[in-house]
Image (spheres, rainbow, N blue to C red):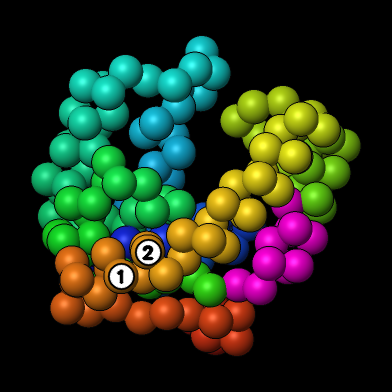
Amino acid sequence: MKKIYIIGPVGSGKTTLAKHLSKKYNIPYFELDKVVYDDFIGMKRFSFEIDNIFSDILKEEEWIIEDVGRDVFHLGIVEADMVYYLDVPVFILYKRCLFRCIKQRIGFMEYSYYPTISSLFQMFEWINTDKFSKDEKLSIITKSSNNYKVLKRTDIKMMEK
C-alpha cells in the first residue's frame, strides 16, 4: 500500500495512526486540516488554494492522508490503495477532546490555534454532527473504494504496535 486515506471524527486518533504508519512504512503523511487552514495566519484558505495543495498531494507517489471525510477531498478516497474509517465510541471522542484541550492549555501538547472553551465546544459539536453522518461517510467510502476497512479501537491499537 502506497496511498492510505484515514477518515474519522475529531478525536478518533487519525493523526496518531497516520504518524505511526508514516514512520512504519516511511511514507509522508498529510493532515488535511492543514490544507484547509493556514497555520501561519490562522485562517481558512481560499477554495482554489485548497484544491491546488490537495492536487499536489495526490500527485505524490506515496502518501498517507487523514481527514474527517470532507466532500472536497473525495478524490483521495478514489485514489487511495486503502481507506480506513476509525469508528471510536462517542464518549471516548469527548474524553480525548477534553484532555487534548487541557494538555494544549498547559503546554504539554502543540496546537494550531489557541485552545479555548469555545473551541472545545466546537469539537463537541463536530463529534455530534459526525455521529449522524457516519453511515453517509461509510456509504461514500464503500462506493468509492475497493479496499477499505472500518477500524474499532482495538484494531487501531493493534495497528499502532
Residue 16 x %, y %? 55, 61
Q: Residue at x 24, y 38 (%)?
A: 54
Residue 93 x %, y %? 69, 62
- Outermost residue toward the top in this view: 41
In the drawing, does residue 52 fall left or right of residue 115? left
Quadrant for the N terminus in the image: bottom left
Mark 2 — residue?
136
Residue 34: name its quadrant.
Answer: top left
Q: Residue at x 62, y 54 (%)?
A: 127
Q: Which numbered disc covers residue 115?
A: none
Q: Is residue 27 visible?
A: no
Q: Residue at x 49, y 70 (%)?
A: 86
Is label 2 in contact with label 1 (beta carbons under 8 Å)? yes
Q: Is residue 54 visible?
A: yes
Judged from the image, the secondary structure of the residue bearing numbered disc 2 is: helix
Q: Which numbered disc covers residue 139?
A: 1
| Bounds of the magenta segment | 88-97
* Of 63 and 54, the residue lying toward us: 54
Judged from the image, the secondary structure of the residue bearing numbered disc 1 is: helix
* Above or below, 146 relative to 131: below
* Above or below, 149 relative to 122: below
Residue 146: name its quadrant.
Answer: bottom left
> Dot 2: few (<14), some (14–19), or many (≥20) neighbours within 10 Å?
few
Residue 77 x %, y %? 23, 60
How many marks are shown on the rendered structure? 2
Amino acid marked by disc 2: Glu
